[in-house]
Image: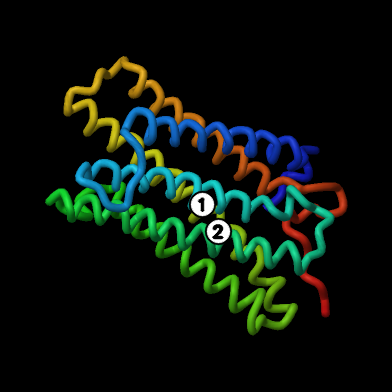
Amino acid sequence: MAAAGLGVKAAPFTYAAHALAAAAAVLVLVWCVHFRGGLALEAQNKNLIFNVHPVLMLIGYIILGSEAIMIYKVFPKLNHDTAKLTHLILHAIATVLGAFGIYCAFKFHNDSGIANLYSLHSWLGIGTISLYGIQWVFGFVTFFFPGEAPSVRRRALPWHALFGLFVYVLALATAELGFLEKLTFLESGGLDKYGAEAFLVNFTALVVVLFGASVVVAAVTPAHDEAPQGYEQIPVN
Protein backbone atom coordinates (compact mmCIF):
# COMPACT_ATOMS: atom_id res chain seq x y z
CA MET A 1 0.00 0.00 0.00
CA ALA A 2 3.00 2.33 -0.13
CA ALA A 3 5.09 4.09 -2.76
CA ALA A 4 8.22 4.40 -0.66
CA GLY A 5 10.38 3.06 -3.48
CA LEU A 6 9.49 6.09 -5.60
CA GLY A 7 10.77 8.50 -2.97
CA VAL A 8 7.33 10.13 -2.73
CA LYS A 9 6.10 11.40 0.63
CA ALA A 10 2.52 11.94 1.73
CA ALA A 11 2.85 15.52 3.04
CA PRO A 12 2.56 17.44 -0.29
CA PHE A 13 -0.53 15.45 -1.21
CA THR A 14 -2.19 16.10 2.15
CA TYR A 15 -1.59 19.83 1.63
CA ALA A 16 -3.11 19.62 -1.85
CA ALA A 17 -6.03 17.57 -0.57
CA HIS A 18 -6.89 20.12 2.13
CA ALA A 19 -6.73 23.02 -0.33
CA LEU A 20 -8.93 21.16 -2.81
CA ALA A 21 -11.34 20.12 -0.04
CA ALA A 22 -11.80 23.74 0.98
CA ALA A 23 -12.37 24.72 -2.65
CA ALA A 24 -14.89 21.90 -3.20
CA ALA A 25 -16.80 22.80 -0.03
CA VAL A 26 -17.06 26.46 -1.04
CA LEU A 27 -18.11 25.57 -4.57
CA VAL A 28 -20.88 23.17 -3.55
CA LEU A 29 -22.22 25.73 -1.06
CA VAL A 30 -22.18 28.47 -3.70
CA TRP A 31 -24.05 26.16 -6.06
CA CYS A 32 -26.70 25.05 -3.57
CA VAL A 33 -27.18 28.37 -1.76
CA HIS A 34 -26.58 30.99 -4.45
CA PHE A 35 -27.71 29.22 -7.61
CA ARG A 36 -30.22 26.72 -6.19
CA GLY A 37 -31.84 28.95 -3.56
CA GLY A 38 -30.61 27.61 -0.22
CA LEU A 39 -31.01 24.65 2.14
CA ALA A 40 -34.01 23.40 4.10
CA LEU A 41 -35.39 20.25 5.67
CA GLU A 42 -38.99 21.43 5.26
CA ALA A 43 -40.07 23.85 2.55
CA GLN A 44 -42.72 24.55 -0.05
CA ASN A 45 -39.94 24.59 -2.59
CA LYS A 46 -38.88 20.94 -2.45
CA ASN A 47 -35.65 21.69 -4.29
CA LEU A 48 -34.33 23.26 -1.08
CA ILE A 49 -34.66 19.86 0.59
CA PHE A 50 -32.68 18.23 -2.20
CA ASN A 51 -29.95 20.84 -1.87
CA VAL A 52 -29.03 19.41 1.53
CA HIS A 53 -28.09 16.16 -0.21
CA PRO A 54 -25.03 17.28 -2.22
CA VAL A 55 -23.81 19.48 0.63
CA LEU A 56 -23.87 16.66 3.18
CA MET A 57 -22.59 14.02 0.78
CA LEU A 58 -19.59 16.10 -0.21
CA ILE A 59 -18.70 17.98 2.98
CA GLY A 60 -20.07 15.60 5.60
CA TYR A 61 -19.40 12.29 3.89
CA ILE A 62 -16.53 12.52 1.42
CA ILE A 63 -14.47 15.33 2.95
CA LEU A 64 -14.78 14.12 6.55
CA GLY A 65 -14.12 10.57 5.38
CA SER A 66 -11.02 11.83 3.61
CA GLU A 67 -9.79 13.45 6.82
CA ALA A 68 -10.25 10.11 8.57
CA ILE A 69 -8.19 8.38 5.89
CA MET A 70 -5.40 10.97 6.04
CA ILE A 71 -5.19 11.32 9.82
CA TYR A 72 -2.18 8.99 9.99
CA LYS A 73 -0.38 11.06 7.33
CA VAL A 74 -1.38 14.54 8.48
CA PHE A 75 -0.20 13.79 12.03
CA PRO A 76 2.39 11.00 11.61
CA LYS A 77 3.78 11.49 15.12
CA LEU A 78 0.40 11.43 16.82
CA ASN A 79 -0.04 8.75 19.48
CA HIS A 80 -1.25 5.56 17.77
CA ASP A 81 -4.31 5.12 19.98
CA THR A 82 -5.29 8.78 19.59
CA ALA A 83 -4.94 8.58 15.80
CA LYS A 84 -6.97 5.37 15.72
CA LEU A 85 -9.76 6.88 17.83
CA THR A 86 -9.82 10.03 15.66
CA HIS A 87 -9.94 7.86 12.54
CA LEU A 88 -12.86 5.92 13.99
CA ILE A 89 -14.83 8.99 15.12
CA LEU A 90 -14.41 10.90 11.85
CA HIS A 91 -15.59 7.88 9.87
CA ALA A 92 -18.56 7.47 12.21
CA ILE A 93 -19.58 11.12 11.73
CA ALA A 94 -19.12 10.79 7.97
CA THR A 95 -21.33 7.69 7.93
CA VAL A 96 -24.12 9.40 9.89
CA LEU A 97 -24.01 12.56 7.76
CA GLY A 98 -23.88 10.49 4.59
CA ALA A 99 -26.91 8.47 5.67
CA PHE A 100 -28.79 11.68 6.49
CA GLY A 101 -27.82 13.11 3.12
CA ILE A 102 -29.32 10.06 1.44
CA TYR A 103 -32.45 10.47 3.56
CA CYS A 104 -32.78 14.03 2.23
CA ALA A 105 -32.66 12.74 -1.35
CA PHE A 106 -35.41 10.20 -0.57
CA LYS A 107 -37.47 12.89 1.18
CA PHE A 108 -37.17 15.18 -1.84
CA HIS A 109 -38.26 12.38 -4.17
CA ASN A 110 -41.15 11.30 -1.96
CA ASP A 111 -42.42 14.86 -1.38
CA SER A 112 -42.13 15.62 -5.10
CA GLY A 113 -43.71 12.39 -6.33
CA ILE A 114 -40.48 11.20 -7.97
CA ALA A 115 -39.56 7.51 -8.10
CA ASN A 116 -36.66 6.27 -5.98
CA LEU A 117 -33.68 4.09 -6.84
CA TYR A 118 -34.05 4.18 -10.62
CA SER A 119 -30.55 5.39 -11.53
CA LEU A 120 -27.00 4.06 -11.35
CA HIS A 121 -26.15 6.96 -9.05
CA SER A 122 -28.77 5.88 -6.52
CA TRP A 123 -27.78 2.21 -6.72
CA LEU A 124 -24.12 3.01 -6.16
CA GLY A 125 -25.05 5.46 -3.41
CA ILE A 126 -26.94 2.83 -1.40
CA GLY A 127 -24.24 0.25 -2.04
CA THR A 128 -21.45 2.60 -1.05
CA ILE A 129 -22.99 3.78 2.22
CA SER A 130 -23.73 0.14 3.10
CA LEU A 131 -20.14 -0.92 2.43
CA TYR A 132 -18.92 2.12 4.35
CA GLY A 133 -20.94 1.04 7.36
CA ILE A 134 -19.70 -2.55 7.12
CA GLN A 135 -16.12 -1.31 6.91
CA TRP A 136 -16.63 0.85 10.01
CA VAL A 137 -18.10 -2.03 12.03
CA PHE A 138 -15.26 -4.32 10.96
CA GLY A 139 -12.68 -1.72 11.95
CA PHE A 140 -14.41 -1.11 15.28
CA VAL A 141 -14.57 -4.74 16.39
CA THR A 142 -11.15 -5.66 14.99
CA PHE A 143 -9.01 -2.69 15.98
CA PHE A 144 -10.94 -0.93 18.75
CA PHE A 145 -13.43 -2.95 20.81
CA PRO A 146 -13.27 -5.73 21.73
CA GLY A 147 -10.21 -5.83 19.46
CA GLU A 148 -8.50 -8.86 18.01
CA ALA A 149 -5.10 -10.20 18.97
CA PRO A 150 -2.15 -8.15 17.61
CA SER A 151 -1.25 -10.90 15.14
CA VAL A 152 -4.78 -10.89 13.72
CA ARG A 153 -4.84 -7.10 13.51
CA ARG A 154 -1.53 -7.04 11.65
CA ARG A 155 -2.88 -9.48 9.07
CA ALA A 156 -6.19 -7.65 8.79
CA LEU A 157 -4.76 -4.13 8.50
CA PRO A 158 -3.67 -4.23 4.82
CA TRP A 159 -7.06 -5.63 3.80
CA HIS A 160 -8.87 -3.06 5.92
CA ALA A 161 -6.88 -0.25 4.28
CA LEU A 162 -7.32 -1.68 0.77
CA PHE A 163 -11.07 -2.20 1.14
CA GLY A 164 -11.39 1.25 2.69
CA LEU A 165 -9.76 2.85 -0.34
CA PHE A 166 -12.00 0.82 -2.63
CA VAL A 167 -15.11 2.11 -0.85
CA TYR A 168 -13.68 5.64 -0.90
CA VAL A 169 -13.08 5.54 -4.66
CA LEU A 170 -16.60 4.14 -5.07
CA ALA A 171 -17.93 7.12 -3.09
CA LEU A 172 -16.04 9.51 -5.35
CA ALA A 173 -17.41 7.80 -8.47
CA THR A 174 -20.93 8.00 -7.03
CA ALA A 175 -20.49 11.72 -6.35
CA GLU A 176 -19.33 12.32 -9.92
CA LEU A 177 -22.38 10.48 -11.25
CA GLY A 178 -24.52 12.63 -8.96
CA PHE A 179 -23.11 15.86 -10.37
CA LEU A 180 -23.61 14.56 -13.90
CA GLU A 181 -27.15 13.36 -13.25
CA LYS A 182 -28.32 16.58 -11.59
CA LEU A 183 -26.72 18.82 -14.21
CA THR A 184 -28.28 16.73 -16.99
CA PHE A 185 -31.72 17.14 -15.38
CA LEU A 186 -31.21 20.89 -14.99
CA GLU A 187 -30.06 21.31 -18.58
CA SER A 188 -33.01 19.24 -19.80
CA GLY A 189 -35.20 21.72 -17.91
CA GLY A 190 -33.70 24.69 -19.73
CA LEU A 191 -30.50 25.53 -17.86
CA ASP A 192 -27.94 27.14 -20.15
CA LYS A 193 -25.37 24.47 -20.99
CA TYR A 194 -22.66 27.13 -21.21
CA GLY A 195 -23.92 29.29 -18.36
CA ALA A 196 -22.31 30.09 -15.03
CA GLU A 197 -24.15 27.40 -13.07
CA ALA A 198 -23.32 24.62 -15.51
CA PHE A 199 -19.68 25.71 -15.47
CA LEU A 200 -19.68 25.77 -11.66
CA VAL A 201 -21.12 22.25 -11.37
CA ASN A 202 -18.64 20.81 -13.87
CA PHE A 203 -15.74 22.63 -12.23
CA THR A 204 -16.81 21.40 -8.78
CA ALA A 205 -16.89 17.83 -10.07
CA LEU A 206 -13.39 18.30 -11.50
CA VAL A 207 -12.10 19.65 -8.18
CA VAL A 208 -13.59 16.62 -6.42
CA VAL A 209 -11.72 14.29 -8.80
CA LEU A 210 -8.42 16.05 -8.07
CA PHE A 211 -9.21 16.08 -4.36
CA GLY A 212 -9.93 12.35 -4.31
CA ALA A 213 -6.78 11.59 -6.26
CA SER A 214 -4.72 13.58 -3.75
CA VAL A 215 -6.26 11.67 -0.85
CA VAL A 216 -5.63 8.28 -2.45
CA VAL A 217 -2.00 9.12 -3.24
CA ALA A 218 -1.50 10.45 0.30
CA ALA A 219 -2.97 7.23 1.69
CA VAL A 220 -0.60 4.95 -0.23
CA THR A 221 2.58 6.97 0.29
CA PRO A 222 4.66 6.96 3.50
CA ALA A 223 4.45 9.84 5.94
CA HIS A 224 8.19 9.54 6.58
CA ASP A 225 11.03 7.10 6.02
CA GLU A 226 10.42 5.24 9.27
CA ALA A 227 6.86 4.23 8.32
CA PRO A 228 7.10 2.59 4.86
CA GLN A 229 3.76 0.81 5.22
CA GLY A 230 1.74 4.00 5.34
CA TYR A 231 -0.49 3.39 8.35
CA GLU A 232 1.24 3.22 11.72
CA GLN A 233 2.29 -0.28 12.67
CA ILE A 234 0.14 -2.16 15.17
CA PRO A 235 1.96 -2.53 18.48
CA VAL A 236 3.02 -6.04 19.47
CA ASN A 237 1.34 -5.67 22.88
Q: CA distance from mark 2 to mark 1?
A: 6 Å
Give the amino acid at mark 2: Gly
Visual colour scheme: rainbow
Q: Position of residue 93 (x, y in %)?
A: 53, 61
SS of the residue under disc 2? helix
Are the residues flagged by discs 2 and 1 in contact, CB closer than 8 Å?
yes
> Quick check: 102 left or right of 86?
left
Q: Which mark is residue 164?
A: 2
Q: Write the residue at 59% across / 59% down.
A: 90
Q: Quadrant of residue 104?
A: bottom left
Q: Position of residue 193 (x, y in %)?
A: 27, 19
- The relative height of residue 165 versus residue 189 in the rendered view (above or below) is below
Classed neighbour count for the residue bearing mark 1: other residues with Cα under 10 Å, few (<14), some (14–19), many (≥20): many
Judging depth in this view, the residue of 149 and 24 nearest the camera is 24
Give the amino acid at mark 1: Tyr
SS of the residue under disc 1? helix
Question: Which residue bears the numbered disc 1?
Answer: 168
